[in-house]
Image (spheres, rainbow, N blue to C red):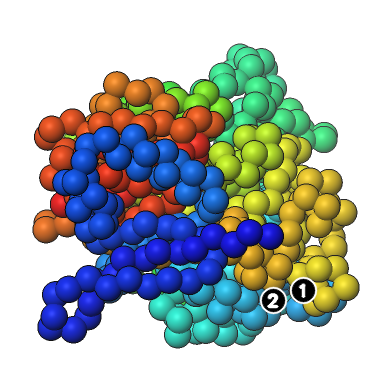
Amino acid sequence: MQQLFRIRLVRAKSSHQHTRFRFSHTRLVLEEEGILTTLLKKIMKKTIYLYPFLLLLLSYLSSCSNTATVSTAPAKASSWPRGVTYEIFVQSFCDSDGNGIGDIKGMTSKLDYLQDLGVEGIWLMPMNPSPSYHKYDVTDYYGIHPDYGTMEDFKEFIRQAHSRNIKVVMDMVLNHSGVDHPWFQEAMKDKNSPYRDYYVWAHQNDPQTKEEGKIIAGDSDNVNRWHKVQGSDYLYYGYFYGGMPDLNFDNAALKEEVFKIGRYWLKEVGVDGFRLDAARHIFPDDRPEDNHQWWVEFKKEMQKVKPDVYLVGEVWAPADVVAPYTKGLPALFNFEMSWAILDALNSGKGNSLAIKHAGIMDFYKKENPEFIDATILSNHDQNRIMSEVNGDEKKAKMAAALLFTLPGSPYIYYGEEIGMSGKKPDELIREPFLWDVKEKDQCRATWITPTFSTEAVVAPATVQAQQENSMLNHYKTFIRLRNNSNALTYGELKPVQLNNPEISAFERIHQHESLLVLHNLSGAEITLALPVNLQDYRIARFQHNGAALARSKVLLPAYSSLILQR
């Protein structure tokens, strides 16, 4: 097979500021710490007639490789909670004892993997005792589910995570308990129980029990909110379903009990914060101000124990509805932006993404200038991003490129980084992680037989680690890029319009670092001229999929990314 040659122009490290050439036998790439190369500049000075040839050459080269090139490796810039966080469904992540169910010791054994990936925080889905596989119907707020291990196992996990500078956030389910929780069992049996008022009750003749609930969010499609108790004339309220009775936060004793629970996990166990489930539904839908105020109160109580406590809330709603929650929940998941990214990927049009994000941030900043924008592509309640783009790896990689270059503190849903797929029902978007080929995988959970994420369609992590262009290495590259850039981690967002709907273009600016980010969301190559006001972006900081800059002309092959620096 005919071999190509690689020409890499590298500035000399010595005091002599000359340029030297290096050749290798793999492929031909023309690079420079500036526009394209000093070589190209000299050629261009000789004759303008070579310019079309050079663009054609760049186009050819882009088809030879889809690797990424980073011009420099600056010092780490990110610091949690402004870093990358990884969501884990413990049951599916890593099984240490071979019983088919993922557990805490299994997670502990994979902390080095997460550290190498570049994450600085872990969000753990519920681990409390519960009768369900998902464990969102808690029966003991102070315990660890025995399938997952012991409290000492969890404390050791936290110690090991902290030794790697990884924070630990646990899911706190406060909107409701499980029907099997001792509080509810006592409340159901005895109208005079002190726990009766921990829940919301109404007589069967009360008109409100006859009404269907309104669907105001994407977190539930349940309209039957009032549930019967056998042998009783009273019904209890459960927003999600009968197995999850809502707690009554108008009750002072319950509120104090919730504060006690939070203090225990922060002070006695050592977690760094909480992900607050169903944060919009603490009070009924027609009492949003009470919801906002509750989280302000909760934050103050938690800060008494841990001043730097991290709280991230789940509020499925547009930005104008989410924004008031930032007063009590300084971090909130940006569902609206995840929907916009998906729409852009499937339409091939990315020119409105930065505008959309800037608009969302304006809403948040009015309420809390220090808010933390918890950005996502998907989570445990949504179809996986790979399935949402119909298995198109190029689009899935572009999704990651957008996630790690737009503003925000990104969350990765476990397995996203190896291209796991899945569509509802929920069990099928929570399938076991693939660590190695089956005969070598000592850690794969088997509690469910996977439908979507099988080895037939997903290469295990160990295999992908050895593949230069794998999804896993793509994620590592973009996480490293973000973590090492102040502009990408903390920078202001300035949307850029290039009169090309396929390109998502924006500036990220922080102090002395200014970056111009260009993503081609289409399946076609695009060449464009930078506007005069952007032509001072002359340094190619990052190139992916053959993207390149020649003078003020940008070449963006299909699904490529280019980051330029002033």
N-term mark: 1 or 2? 2
Please provide percent x and percent y for residue 308: 30, 67
Please provide percent x and percent y for residue 315: 45, 38
Residue placed most toward the observer, 237 or 75: 75
Q: From what the image shows, is residue 471 above or below residue 118?
A: above
Image quarter for residue 112?
A: bottom right
Q: CA distance from mark 1 to mark 2?
A: 7 Å
Q: Which mark is residue 296?
A: none
Q: From what the image shows, is residue 26 above or below residue 449?
A: below
Residue placed most toward the observer, 406 or 513: 513
Q: Which residue carries the number 1 mark?
A: 443
Q: Is residue 388 left or right of residue 363?
A: right
At a point 45% along the width and 41% down the height, the residue shown is: 59
The secondary structure type at the circle numbered 2 is: helix
Q: Which residue carries the number 2 mark?
A: 106
At a point 69% along the width and 76% down the height, the residue shown is: 106
Residue placed most toward the observer, 427 or 306: 427
Residue placed most toward the observer, 145 or 27: 27
Going by the numbered disc 2, the residue's amino acid type is Gly
Label 1 vs label 2, nearer the camera: 1
Locate the N terminus by quadrant. bottom right
